[in-house]
Structures are given as C-alpha cells and as structure tokens.
Image (cartoon, coloured by chain):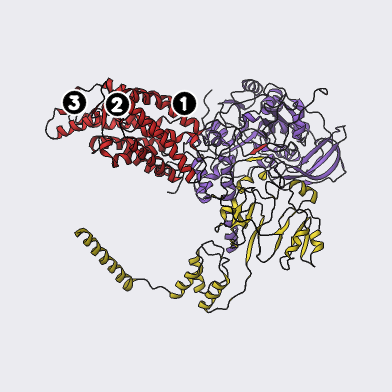
C-alpha cells in the first residue's frame, strides 16, 4: 500500500513538473501551422514535391508553395486551407491512374514460363517478361507495391487494376511501371481504351483477345473528336470524352468503363508470392 | 606448372563438353540469312544497301555508326529481300536485313591481303581490323579496333589471349585451337604488333591437354607463352585471367588497360588473321550446338544470320523436347523462347537443356549460409546485397559495391535457397546507374 | 539424311530465366537433413543413457516445433515451409539441450518460445537474429530454474544427481571457503573416458562427445558447416581455460575437463555454426567463434552459472550484424582504403 502511494505521488509530481516546464520553457508553435497540419492527409507520399506533409504545410505558411499540389486532399479541405492562409482557391481537376492494358492470363498469351524474381522491373531483363504482346502488363506487382494508398490490385489472373476510389493520383505507379502502361487521366472520364500496343490489329489480336484491333468502330460512332486513332490504337480524347454507352460498340472489350471488381481480400502481400 | 595465381572463389560446375571430340564442320548454304544490324556494343551500324539490291559474300552491308561501332558484311551472295526486324536474344525485336541466297555464294573482292604483316605498319593493321568488322568473339562483342587503340596515357605491356573456355558445354574455342593453330598464332602476333608488346600469355584450361600441347608446339620460337591454368569457373573472366597470369588486379570500375593489359579471345585472334592475311571480313564464326536432347551435338562454322532452328536441324534435331534453350554457355548465357533467332558474331554456343537438367529458382528466404560470399570471384557479399535489393534499398547496394559484380553466376549456382542472385544484381546495377545519370543531369541543370 | 525425320523442339513450353542456368543442387532441405543425420548418433546415445524420458522429451520438442511452425505459417498467411525441415532441426536441438526428465508441458512452452518468438515473429527462416533453440532454452532456464537444473545420472537406476559442471562448481565453492584440496580431490576421481563416452549427467544431447564429434566431422567433410567455427571456438576455450588452469590449478579445472563436459562440443559444431545467426563471411565467422569461446570461458571460470554456452552464443548472435559490416571487405581490385563506411 505504501509502495502504491509513493509511486502515485511520484508520478503526479513528475507530471506536474513536465507540464510547468512545457508551459514556461516550451518552444513557441505557430497556431496557423498547427491548424494546417491538422488538415494534411498525413500520407507523406511526396506527390506535392516535398519530402512529407509537414514540409509542405510549412512551405504553404511561408508562402513558398500554393495549396492544391496535394492530390490526396479533398476540394473542401483545400478551400479550408485557402481560407486559413487568406489566398484565393484554385480549381483543379481530380485525376486517377489507369493501367492501359487488358491482357490478363485469360486473354493474353505468354511466350514462355518466366522463372525468377517476382517483380515486373526484374522480369524485364529476362526476355522482356516473355509475354507475347511486348507492351502488355506482366502482372507481377511492382506498381501495387509502390502505391502508398494500396489502390492497385493484381487480379488473380495477373493483371494490374487501379481502384479509382482509392487512387490519389500521386504518380508513383506511373514511374514504377517498366512498360509505361500507367498514366494519370481525369477521373471524370467515363471510358478508356485499355490497350497500349501500337502493333497492327491482326498481330495484336493473336497475342491478346482483349487488345484494341484498330477497327475504328468507336471513332466512327463517337462524336466529333471524342475518339481518335493513334496509328492502330484508338485513344480517348480526355478534353471531350465520349459517353459510357460507346463501350458497347467495341468488339474486343478494350474500350470499357473503369469500375473494377471490389478489391479481393486475398491480396496479402502486394503480389509478392503471386 | 603452378606458378600461376589462384583467384578467390569460383565454382566447379560439371563440364558436360559433349562436343569436344567433334571436329568443326562447315554448315551448308541456306536459302536465307537474317542479319541483325547490331551485333556489337556501341552505336548500331548504318545500312548502306537497300531492299532488292544484289550483294556478294563479304560485301559491306552496314557502315559503323560511330567510333564505338562495327561494320557488318554479307554472309553470302544474293538479294536483300527485306529490311525489317528480327527476334533477338534479349526477347526484343532487332533491326535486321533478310538476304535471299542465290545459291552461288559468289565472293566480293576481298580487302587487300597483307601477306607481309610482320613488317607492316601497325596503323594499317589496325585499320584493317576496323574494315573487317571484327568484334570480341568471346561473348562481349566489343569492337576490336577500339579495344586495340588505348589512349596514350594507358601504355600497354602485356597481351593476354583467352583460350580458357571455362563455361561448361562450350567447345568451339577448343576445337578451333586443335584445327587452326597456325592461324591463331599469326593472329596473336598481329595483335602484338599493333600494340607493340613483347609479353604475350595464352591461357588454356588444363582440361584441354591436347590443345595445350599443340599450341605450345606451334608457339615455339614466338614470344607467346602457353599457360595451362587450373580448371575453375570463371577462370576465363578477364579480371581473373589477368590476375592468374600476372598477379595484377584490374582496379574496381576500371578496364584492363589501366594496368597495362589487353585481353583478346582466341576466336577473335583467328578472325584477325583471316582479315589481315586473306582479306576476309568477319561473317562467319564457330559455334557449339550442344545439349543432351540433341541427336548429334557438334561444332560448326556458321555464317552470321543462320537461325538457331537451322543450327538445331544440322545437329540432327532432338529426341526429347528441351525445357530451356540458351544462347551462350549455361553460366552466363541468355535463355530464349524461340528458335527464330539469328546467330550473331558473338554467339559462342546454342545449348538445349532437358527438363531433368533444369533447376528452377525458388526465391526462398536467404539463410545467410555464406556460400555465395565464399565463391564470389569479386569478393562481394551477394547474400546481403540480395536482401537489400529485394527491399529496393539500392543506395545501400551501391555502398556494398554491387557495381563491381560481373554477373558470372557463381553465387546463384551455389545458393541453397534457389535465389536468382544474378537477376537481383542486374536490377540493382540498372537502378544505380539510372539514378547516377538522373543525379548528374539534375546537377547539370541546376549549375 | 532425308529418310530420317528430323524432329525440331517444340518452343511453346520453354522456361526463361536469368543466368546461370546450372545449379549445384544445394538446397536448404539437404543441409537440414544432413545436420539431423549428424545429430542422430548423439540422440541415440542420450536415449541409451537416460532412457525413455529422454526419448519423450526429444519427440515432444520435435513434433511440437514442427506443428507450431505450421500453425504460425497458417495464422500469418505465409506459405508453408515446414518441408525444409528447419523446424524439425530446431526441435531436435532444443530437446537435446534439455534435461532428460523435463515435463511435457515445459517442452511445449519451450517449443512455443523457440519457434514463435525465436523465429516466426521475425518473418520465418533466415530472418531471425538469435538461434531459436537457444532462445527457447534460455527462456526455460530463466523461467523454470528448478526443473531445468534437475539432472539424472545414467545407470541401471536413473538417479538424480549433479552434472560434472555442477560438481565442479561445488568443489570450487569449497576451495574458496578454505578447503584447498577440494578441487584436486574431485578431479582425481573424475573419469575422462566416461565423459568422452557420455556416462555423466547433463542434457540429453550434450553428453556423448564421441557421437557429437563423429557427427561434426561428417558435417565438415560434407561442407555443410564451416570448419573454422568449431575449430576456433574449441581452440579459444582450450587456450583460455588452459591458461587459467596453469596459473592456478587449485581453483580451475584443466581444459580437457571443460571441453568434455557441458555443451561446448554440441555448441561448437551445431549451434554456433547455424548459418542464419552467424556472420556471412569467413573472417566474421572466425571472430564470432573466438568471441563465443571467450564468453564461454569467462562464464565457466568466473560466472554464476555452471554452464555458459547458451548465453555465449546468444550474445555473439547479437553482434553478428556488426561483424558482418566490419568484415565485409573490399571487392577485388578496390583501392586500399576502408570498403564500407560504417
């Protein structure tokens, strides 16, 4: 009992001492910086160009950076920060990353069995991944592991798919993909052409059943300049995208909307033991 | 004769030299040859002929694309059917020309033969090597005329000729030594004349006693010293070879010329002799086609542009389907997924492995047994490097000297956890060099 | 050749991988299997001397270690790797380090700590900093000192008694209290032949030096373990204890006593040579072995515990990463200055 009282008393005394020291000797904190730090997402993804959320907040207070560089912040948070800083808000458009490939194990063929490190960037050294379509997704998960928000799923059929609701458009996956299949596009675009191969239609088709065969049905059925042909590959014009119904005309399903299946629960390690 | 030095590490894979007793045969003329336009390190060669032009055997097809580049010559007479791409050993498409043979195999005018090469001006000899499109035929395919023109601040006093052929299964250099020793000796002396050196070592592994004896006999009266070396992989790696023969160490990140040495492969020496004495440019080389699935493994003179399929057909085809097809030797060769790849100037072997011979990588956790460290000829620590690389800590890998790795494969060979260590090293080297280039570009931009 | 059909290989099911395409056929399973084979003679000797309770301890430890690893793998959603026999080996080593009459529940607790805390928490094989069997043993030693110090003398009636090291400790205490003949009297009636063959009290697997040496030499001959580790460890213990004995024979036992009793031989060949927890480089392994030898000798000569092998190896395991960085060395051809900035 005595011991308990002594410990209790010591604890209270020390707590009081710490409180007094902080009050009288503590460092001055800027209430504006504190308020902005509260609003930061805290992901430290680096998309703003600063090493972490704290640095970006400090730069905004010092007026060396503008709000709006953080892709992870909602519009209302940006407005709140702008009001705190006393600057006018800037409109910007939400973007998402999209993997422009449909070639999973079911649709795309492989030239050979790849045996080695389970990482797309490593697989590029061995016969460029040994997929028949040399532009196609290898499905070994380098992008999924790079995503700080866990927004990329490697489907059980080995295709990378970005979940647009989770994607914060930080751009890490864009740099990681060795085939350069991922791009940041406006989140409002309803459909995309999930193919990146510039090869001739018949060649693409023999390599992957989901490829864009360059039949031009989408270009012909869309409004003026909503779709265009880049050689043998159809491309959506993101300045004036076509409506979602246009996906019905695509014979291979390369043109379709960007709503993947809900994230499967089995992805425990980002595709490492795929 | 153990006055040579032991390098650290190394392994003893099974030799499997199935074709070592098979004499080199000439490959029959084919109907078409697919000649890639880049069979060397450096800038791609620039085409000087067009579609539908007629060409003769040995005629110039493509001019060198820069200082570090090489010429390409036609393997036979015929017509340029197409200027297109072909599948290369890296699994990507390479620019190539397809020549349809007219069956005559008519030769173009040879380059002017230089029979009095022993008194000829070294610069003339060097120029001839460039004209003939000679590249390193041991696998590296570095343009030889660049290698033999070291800058004046790097004086050369030793020439090392690599007749070691430490890779298992390959026998092309061995047979070349047995069947063409005089030409090789002449080639070596030509190179020595170009460099102006008196110290010449010819290294041959002790598992080729017939070659050692024959070359020693033919080299009598010349300054060439034939040195039988211990059988250990990678005895033929240039840094280890120089160390074994001269005890000099090539500085980390440097080239042999920094310590006064130049290394040349024996097949390159033979090609140099052909180019200088007979005026024949380089369009043919000896390649070993071997492997247990093949009916009749052997060695052939293949012309550049012969497809692997034609080579396997010459070897009698297979009696069982292989699990792996490798271009080069089993320790450092590239595995390919098709036989529609052409033989290039630096393709020393085509190896087929049966399913029972293939041991797949399992990529289990490193158990830190240290076998990789004990066998690494560059004295690195591959186990620790691989853990760093798996976790993408490339800056740590750079500190632990990953750039010194020569990708010989000794570490992966002994790893009990089946880890693809060489693939890790290659990835790290690519990333580290890319980051260094990015940093250099950023510094330049900001300065 | 036209009448013979030339069969070209099918190229639709080839394997592509990075070089090298040859492999030495080394595997983790092979290494573990040979270590288990090398341990079997001393296990059999232990069962022979200590009877059925020893067999029970070994069996319980082995089976529970394998089961716990399988369970942990399932819970952690990691692929099952028990088939590489490393858990089997850990269980066997743990059992060999326990007294013969250890109750089953204590064996189970030991296995749980050895595999669960000593290995699986860190991520499975290759990731643990400390030798799992020794982690289990140290935990049991500190938690259940009474049970862990109940030894059995082999013989027709297995009687409880002291191990030679405990007897040495008692003799030394007597010497320090004034009876200077206590140690020489004790040493006179010691039979080194008995110690060599294993007829003495101790853990199940540490008593029969003959069997352990046979197993250890087999492993060195097969190049499963590095010869430098046991050699330098035993050499250091011999020199250290030998020097102490030469300086003061009334207080210290001769080196052969220290080598033949306790877990030094078992530790030298089978515990200190564990690849995961010892340094990667040869030079590092030598320093590791010397360090173990010094700490074993210090604990034996001046420490409170009669036996020091467990703690010596665990302490040196903690120093392994430092030894790795210190002995990393420079690559071939690097200039003659420090290779790695520590």
Label 2, secondary structure: give it: helix
Label 2 and label 3: CA atoms lie apart by 16 Å
**Image mark 1: chain:** C
The chain assigned the colour yellow in the figure is A
Residue identified by numbered label 3: C186
* 1 vs 3, front mark: 3
Q: Does residue B169 show up?
A: yes
Crowding near the residue tagged with mark 1, few <14, some 14–19, many ≥20 C-alpha atoms within 10 Å: few
**Image mark 2: chain:** C
Label 1 and label 3: CA atoms lie apart by 40 Å
Give the number of the disc on residue C222.
Answer: 1
- Residue B204 vs residue B333, the one in the foreground: B333
Asked if A117 appears above or below B347 in the picture, the reply is: below
Colour in which the image shows chain B: purple
Image spot of residue C86 (x, y percent): 45, 35
Check if mark 1's residue and mark 2's residue have beta carbons within 8 Å.
Answer: no
Asked if B19 appears above or below A57 in the picture, the reply is: above
Residue A207 shown left or right of residue C340 in the figure: right
Crowding near the residue tagged with mark 3, few <14, some 14–19, many ≥20 C-alpha atoms within 10 Å: some
Residue C18 shown left or right of residue A18 in the figure: right
Q: Residue furthest left?
A: C178
Image spot of residue B211 (x, y percent): 64, 22
The chain assigned the colour red in the figure is C
Residue at 49% x, 74% y is A61
Pointer 1 or 3: first along the chain: 3
Pointer 1 or 2: first along the chain: 1
Label 1, secondary structure: give it: loop
Residue identified by numbered label 2: C260
Give the number of the disc on residue B152.
Answer: none
């Amino acid at each position: 009992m005595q011991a308990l009282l002594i410990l209790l008393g010591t604890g209270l005394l020390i707590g009081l001492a710490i409180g007094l020291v902080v009050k009288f000797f503590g460092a001055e904190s800027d209430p504006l910086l504190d308020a902005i730090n509260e609003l930061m997402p805290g992901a430290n993804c680096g998309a703003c160009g600063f090493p972490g959320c704290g640095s970006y907040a400090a730069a905004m207070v010092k007026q060396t950076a503008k709000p709006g560089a953080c892709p992870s912040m909602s519009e209302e948070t940006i407005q709140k920060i702008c009001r705190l800083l006393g600057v006018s808000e800037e409109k910007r458009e939400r973007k998402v990353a999209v993997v422009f490939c449909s070639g999973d194990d079911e649709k795309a063929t492989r030239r050979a069995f790849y045996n080695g490190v389970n990482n797309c960037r490593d697989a590029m050294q061995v016969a460029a991944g040994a997929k028949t379509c040399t532009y196609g997704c290898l499905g070994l998960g380098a992008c999924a592991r790079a995503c700080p928000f866990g927004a990329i799923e490697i489907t059980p059929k080995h295709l990378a798919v970005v979940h647009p609701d989770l994607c914060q458009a930080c751009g890490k996956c864009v740099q990681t993909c060795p085939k350069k299949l991922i791009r940041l596009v406006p989140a409002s675009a309803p459909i995309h052409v999930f193919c990146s191969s510039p090869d001739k239609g018949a060649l693409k088709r023999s390599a992957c059943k989901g490829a864009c065969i360059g039949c031009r049905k989408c270009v012909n059925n869309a409004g003026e300049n909503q779709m265009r042909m880049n050689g043998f590959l159809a491309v959506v014009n993101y300045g004036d995208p076509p409506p979602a119904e246009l996906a019905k005309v695509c014979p291979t399903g390369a043109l379709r909307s960007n709503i993947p299946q809900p994230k499967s629960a089995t992805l425990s390690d980002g595709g490492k033991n795929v | 004769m153990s006055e040579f030095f032991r390098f650290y590490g190394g392994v003893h894979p099974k030799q499997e030299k199935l074709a070592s007793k098979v004499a080199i045969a000439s490959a029959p003329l084919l109907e078409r040859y697919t000649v890639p336009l880049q069979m060397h390190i450096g800038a791609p060669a620039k085409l000087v002929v067009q579609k539908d032009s007629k060409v003769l055997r040995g005629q110039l097809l493509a001019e060198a694309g820069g200082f570090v580049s090489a010429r390409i010559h036609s393997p036979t007479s015929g017509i340029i059917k197409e200027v297109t791409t072909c599948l290369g050993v890296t699994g990507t498409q390479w620019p190539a020309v397809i020549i349809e043979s007219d069956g005559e195999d008519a030769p173009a005018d040879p380059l002017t033969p230089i029979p009095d090469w022993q008194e000829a001006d070294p610069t003339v000899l060097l120029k001839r090597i460039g004209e003939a499109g000679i590249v390193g035929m041991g696998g590296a395919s570095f343009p030889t005329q660049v290698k033999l023109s070291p800058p004046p601040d790097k004086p050369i006093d030793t020439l090392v000729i690599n007749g070691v052929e430490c890779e298992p299964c390959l026998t092309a250099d061995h047979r070349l030594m047995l069947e063409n020793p005089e030409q090789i000796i002449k080639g070596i002396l030509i190179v020595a004349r170009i460099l102006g050196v008196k110290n010449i070592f010819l290294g041959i592994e002790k598992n080729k006693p017939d070659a050692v004896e024959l070359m020693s006999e033919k080299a009598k009266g010349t300054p060439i010293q034939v040195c039988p070396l211990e059988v250990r992989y990678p005895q033929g790696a240039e840094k280890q070879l120089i160390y074994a023969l001269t005890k000099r160490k090539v500085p980390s990140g440097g080239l042999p010329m920094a310590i006064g040495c130049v290394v040349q492969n024996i097949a390159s020496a033979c090609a140099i002799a052909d180019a200088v004495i007979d005026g024949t440019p380089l369009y043919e080389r000896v390649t070993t086609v071997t492997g247990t699935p093949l009916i009749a493994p052997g060695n052939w003179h293949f012309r550049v542009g012969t497809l692997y399929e034609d080579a396997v057909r010459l070897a009698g085809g297979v009696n069982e389907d292989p699990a792996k097809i490798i271009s080069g030797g089993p320790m450092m060769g590239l595995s390919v997924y098709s036989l529609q790849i052409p033989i290039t100037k630096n393709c020393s072997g085509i190896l087929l492995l049966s399913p029972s011979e293939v041991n797949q990588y399992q990529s289990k956790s490193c158990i830190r047994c240290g076998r990789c460290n004990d066998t690494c000829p560059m004295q690195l620590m591959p186990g620790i490097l691989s853990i760093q690389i798996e976790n993408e800590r490339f800056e740590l890998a750079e500190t632990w000297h990953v750039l010194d790795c020569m990708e010989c494969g000794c570490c992966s060979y002994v790893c009990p956890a089946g880890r693809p260590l060489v693939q890790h090293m290659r990835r790290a080297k690519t990333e580290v060099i890319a980051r260094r280039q990015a940093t250099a570009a950023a510094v330049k931009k900001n300065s | 050749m036209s009448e013979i059909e030339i069969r070209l290989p099918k190229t639709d099911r080839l394997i592509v991988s990075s070089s090298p395409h040859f492999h030495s056929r080394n595997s983790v399973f092979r290494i573990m299997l040979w270590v288990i084979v090398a341990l079997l003679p001393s296990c059999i000797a232990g069962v022979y001397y200590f009877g059925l309770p020893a067999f029970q301890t070994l069996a319980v430890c082995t089976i529970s270690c394998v089961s716990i690893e399988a369970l942990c793998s399932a819970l952690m959603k990691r692929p099952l790797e028990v088939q590489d026999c490393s858990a089997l080996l850990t269980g066997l080593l743990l059992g060999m380090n326990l007294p013969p009459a250890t109750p089953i529940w204590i064996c189970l607790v030991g296995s749980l700590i050895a595999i669960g805390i000593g290995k699986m928490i860190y991520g499975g094989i290759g990731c643990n900093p400390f030798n799992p069997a020794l982690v289990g043993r140290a935990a049991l030693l500190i938690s259940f000192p009474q049970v862990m110090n109940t030894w059995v003398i082999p013989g027709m009636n297995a009687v409880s008694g002291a191990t030679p090291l405990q007897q040495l400790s008692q003799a030394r205490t007597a010497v320090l209290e004034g009876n200077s003949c206590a140690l020489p009297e004790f040493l006179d009636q010691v039979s080194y032949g008995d110690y060599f063959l294993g007829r003495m009290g101790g853990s199940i697997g540490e008593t029969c030096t003959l069997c352990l040496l046979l197993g250890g030499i087999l492993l060195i001959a097969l190049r499963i373990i590095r010869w430098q580790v046991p050699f330098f460890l035993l050499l250091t213990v011999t020199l250290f204890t030998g020097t102490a004995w030469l300086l003061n024979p009334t207080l210290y036992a001769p080196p052969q006593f220290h080598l033949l009793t306790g877990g030094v031989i078992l530790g030298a060949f089978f515990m200190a040579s564990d690849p995961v927890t010892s340094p990667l480089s040869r030079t590092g392994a030598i320093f590791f072995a010397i360090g173990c030898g010094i700490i074993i000798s210090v604990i034996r000569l001046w420490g409170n515990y009669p036996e020091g092998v467990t703690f010596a190896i665990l302490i040196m395991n903690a120093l392994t990463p430092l030894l790795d960085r210190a002995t990393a060395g420079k690559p071939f051809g690097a200039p003659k200055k420090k290779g790695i900035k520590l």
